[in-house]
Amino acid sequence: MIAAIAALALAVLGGTVATYGYDPGAPPASRPFTGAATGLVALAAVGLLAGFLVGPTTTSVVLATAAVAAPLGLLAVPAIRDAALDDLAATATYARRLGPIRLTALTAGLVAAAVATWLVVDRMMIEGPNGISTGFVNNLGDLPFHLQAIASMGWAGNVPPEDPTYAGAAFTYPFLADYLSAMFLMVGASLRESILLPNLTLALALGGTLVRFGWAITRDRIAGWLTPVLVVLGGGLGWIVLFEDARAGGGLLATLASPPHDYTIVGDSVWRWGNAITTLLVPQRSLLLGLPLTVVGFTLFWYALRPAVSAAARRQRTIRLGVAGLATGALVLGHTHSFVVLLGTGFMLGLLFAEWRDGRWRGWVVYLAATAVVAAPFALLLVADSSASAGTFFGIEIGWDRGETDPVTFWLLNTGLFIPLLAAALLAGRLPGTGERPLVNGRLLRFWLPFMAWFLIPNVVKLAPWTWDNIKVLYYWWVGSAPLVALVIAALWRARSLGVPRVASRTVAIVAVLALTLAGSLDVWRAVGGGTEYGQFDADAVAFAERVRREVPADALVLHAPTWNPPVYLTGRRSLLGYPGWIWAHGLPYADRERDIGLMYAGGPQAERLLRDWEVEYVEVTPIEHAMLEVDEEYFAGFPVVAQVGDYVLYRVVR
């Protein structure tokens, strides 16, 4: 684990120092968060290249770490070293000016946020005497998928990656986050450590980059601090169900202490806008990698769109756009939906800000060139030999996942006060009686407009086999709009030019924040408070997987039931067919494989032929297969036993 921590720390430090080269005016406190978001992605991308060249080994990790730590050498440049020292001095001066009371309050708030982040990350994968579990119900199926992907690349040397859940096909999934974890496996980290270390760092980076983004576009300190709160804890009006639960379950305090269910997604109901932490960032590791990097890209766009009158300013603008292009390209393999959003946002901003005039287009040419340099090989890696059907990803679907509810009611219930406050931000100062000047000026309004596209398009077009997955794009409307909503709340807190007493205005601001975040907070509390724990692999399954990893060749094809938790997922060995829900979501056909797996476990001459045709080398017979399939025990008794722990048995196929 020490080697993994060292690689991670050097990547963050290298990324932090690199910010002095492309973001010279950044607030000192924001640099480590930007450095973490960019440094870890760079570590994974360079590590993948090194893995191709020398193999996925300790050597490739060392080479990648040395490469991403190289910007530390910039501290030898007097101008950059002086800028870093000035930042340290400015931070110390700011702390002194705060005074002991405010500094203590700020420190306590930051520590609380860090502890809360740790509690979330710690519950993603829980190891104990009973095996492996998770505190998040939405992670129940996703965690085993990521564990198999990580183990296959880190322990089984699956580079270039074949789909570990669908043997014989290219891995057409944005796997960069899992490859980053696989690199930590290569240098001795455990599976849990390989997930915990990058997830914790990226989660903290997300908070910091969101503060910078919110502050940058609004120039309001309160709005900046509120932006990550609204982004990660936001939810709709599902909290109104809380009062019904309180009446039925022993009172409000008892229900708050132990919520009986989630409140952003509630069964087969109208509530479908899941909380970001519990439904997106925890189960979808690619988004956790891609979101902070995308937010960095948005921030670079904002600064690049400022008028640049001097040659130095124009040069700095081009550098910012070049770095934004590198970030965009990396998202192809980091989080493909984020790639589409960041590239599309850049295109729309270029039109809205008339960037084709006065030579400003040159910076955007650099942006596109930098994007292409990284995106082209990554895209080729994803689509080459792909078995996915593109037709399953697109279609017309009005109103997203609203069911029978009309769209207006659906969105007001699922986002609560968010849309009304967003409308207030856009209209304040533009309608009579709403202020002397617009709350959102013309430049910010133009910058926000592309985010509205990320609301409209997923409400019309299906962008994934499962319609709900459109939230991966819809969520960026929320991210881009959160600073504007935060700006309204900040104005209420200050009670300026509102014609109401400050106490009343601040009360409204507090109520607004609570209404926007209560449902999401309840979902997070339910997961991290220890009230939920969902078993993934029992103790025998974990011990069995360790035996399999020791006894079975790294590239072996293991037959198992097509479900979400066979022990083989902990080994990185190949599967003929993983959980069909994953396969369908990736646009792959699975019916033939699922049928043939049932026939193979049924035994007999037909099984012998299918085992040969599918080139199966080992067969897993465990309580999972017995629960799902008809298993011919007598047939498999004729095969040699390779590993056995309790009722978990692995047979070697003899031909």
Image: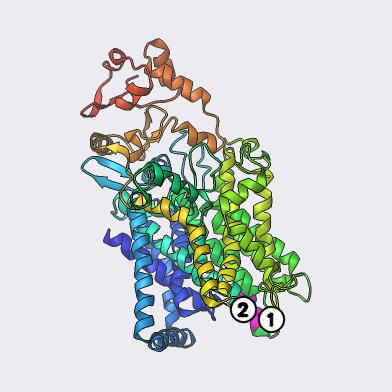
Instruction: Work out whether 595 lies above or below 114.
Output: above
Q: Earlier in the sequence, mark 2 or mark 1?
A: 1
Q: Position of residue 77 (x, y in %)?
A: 46, 84
Residue 274: x %, y % from top left = 50, 48
Residue highlighted by disc 2: 316
How crowded is the residue under tag 2: few (<14 C-alpha within 10 Å), some, or many (20+)?
many
Magenta residue check for 280 = no
Looking at the picture, does residue 90 appear above or below residue 57?
Answer: below
- Point out the stretch of residues depicted in magenta: 313-319
- Residue that mark 1 sits on: 308
CB within 8 Å, label 2 to label 1:
yes
Q: Amino acid at mark 2?
A: Gln
SS assignment at label 2:
helix
Between 428 and 275, which is closer to the camera in this rendering? 428
Please say whether residue 318 is one of the residues in the magenta stretch.
Answer: yes
Inter-mark Cα distance, 2 to 1:
9 Å
Quarter of the image with the C terminus in it: top left
Task: Give the residue type that dot 1 points to.
Answer: Ala
Q: Residue at x 49, y 34 (%)?
A: 581
Helix, strand or loop for disc 1? loop
Q: Label for residue 504?
A: none
Residue 415 in the figure: left or right of residue 189: right
Magenta segment, prevailing SS (helix, strand or loop): helix
